[in-house]
Image (spheres, rainbow, N blue to C red):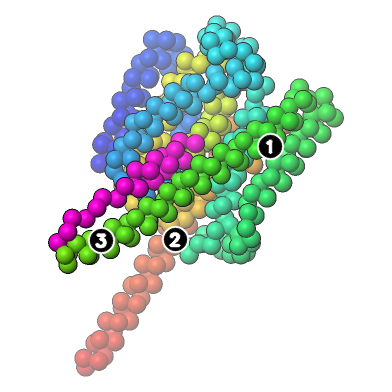
Amino acid sequence: MLLKTFGWSFAVTALGLVAAVFYGGWTGFGIVAILSILEISLSFDNAVVNAGVLKKMNAFWQKIFLTIGVLIAVFGMRLVFPVVIVAISAKIGPIEAVRLALDDKDKYQQLVTDAHPSIAAFGGMFLLMIFLDFIFEDREIKWLAWLERPLAKLGKVDMLSVCIALVVLLVSAMTFATNAHQHGGIHADKTETVLIAGIAGLITYLIVGGLSGYFENKLEEEEEREHEAEEEAKRSGKKVPAVVMAGKAAFFMFLYLEVLDASFSFDGVIGAFAITNDIVLMALGLGIGAMYVRSLTVYLVRQGTLDDYVYLEHGAHYAIGALAVILLVTIQYEIHEVITGLVGVVLIAWSFFSSVQRNRRSAAAEGKDTGSNEKAEVSSGV
């Protein structure tokens, strides 16, 4: 099971490290190894959240997620995306951006740094919406009940998460502009860019999330109809029609996963520039890490880990909220990527141990109930 799920990740790791040695020697090997670990540590919460979505999809779409999805994640976000953001922010062609990435790495890194405010605003708003929609939903299982209960009540107000997200974006942009003006910041003219990028992130979430939710509801309706048709078929002997909405529902859920992965990748891509400005080594290291995130997602689904450790999904969403805040703060202030990674790891580890304790309490309670019932049976028998 482990080899089947992580086999491709192991193979890509071996090929990537060999390619790193040929390209950059043992120094390149070390850089790629560090970047791989960085990506995995920063994206573990991504895997947990992905698993919550992926478990609703069938085996076919899980395979699509591991194949086509990996190509999008590795080549799209880890290789093409850094070039695209430089081309857009510097107003140069993509070919020129590639030339800078390969021939003038220092200038390329500076252009990416200049583009960071818009990247952080887009990713921060997308992730913030995921977090807000999660905590405002009334759930049967609550991790931090003292916090989640009142938030669930507030969540009954329509469009509350959108309003809060827009307020956060406005405050972030205004604070950023004020600080940049007072301290002579180099991004003093990027306030409008931050607002536009943040709104774009919000719109992207609403469109993709709305479409995936719409088709998911349609799928549930069709599954109910199929069940009714099956019952009717048993009585009449007629052929049961196929569920035609499953493909559309799975497609938009897949699209949602890809945008989600892209938003989670922002911190990894930006953090990678603290280690190297070589786009080839960056793509190798982050690509290897992305493979493990994909494999870990499928592993969590197939093992049913989210069902056994019920607070993991909560911890991952709190980590998303923390990452969203960190991205928005980095519009003006620099935060070390180690802190970013540790926040997510601590929250998920906390939720894991809370789940373990909950399972132990449940097992102990069941043991007491079983013992009581056995004593009652013995007493009644006597």
Percent position (x, y) of residue 3? 26, 36
Mark 2 — residue? Answer: 357
> Which residue occupies the foreground of this view, 86 or 147?
86
Disc marking residue 329: 1
Q: Secondary structure at mark 1?
A: helix
Residue 373 appears in the rendering = yes
Percent position (x, y) of residue 33? 44, 23
Mark 3 — residue? Answer: 229
Q: Is residue 291 magenta?
A: no
In which quadrant is the C terminus drawn? bottom left
Based on the displayed image, in which of its 4 quarters is residue 194 positioned? top right
The crowding category of the residue bearing disc 1, from other C-alpha atoms within 10 Å (few below 14, some 14 to 19, many at least 20), is some
Q: Amino acid at mark 2?
A: Gln
Percent position (x, y) of residue 314? 50, 53
Q: Is residue 361 above or below residue 374?
A: above
Magenta segment range? 237-259
Q: Amino acid at mark 3?
A: Ala
Percent position (x, y) of residue 23? 42, 10
- Disc number lying in front (1 or 2): 1
> Which residue occupies the foreground of this view, 160 or 82?
160
Q: Residue at x 39, y 67 (%)?
A: 362
Residue 121 appears in the rendering = no
Q: Is residue 244 magenta?
A: yes
Q: Secondary structure at mark 2?
A: helix
Label 2 near label 1: C-beta < 8 Å? Answer: no
Q: Residue at x 85, y 30 (%)?
A: 182
- Disc number lying in front (3 or 1): 3
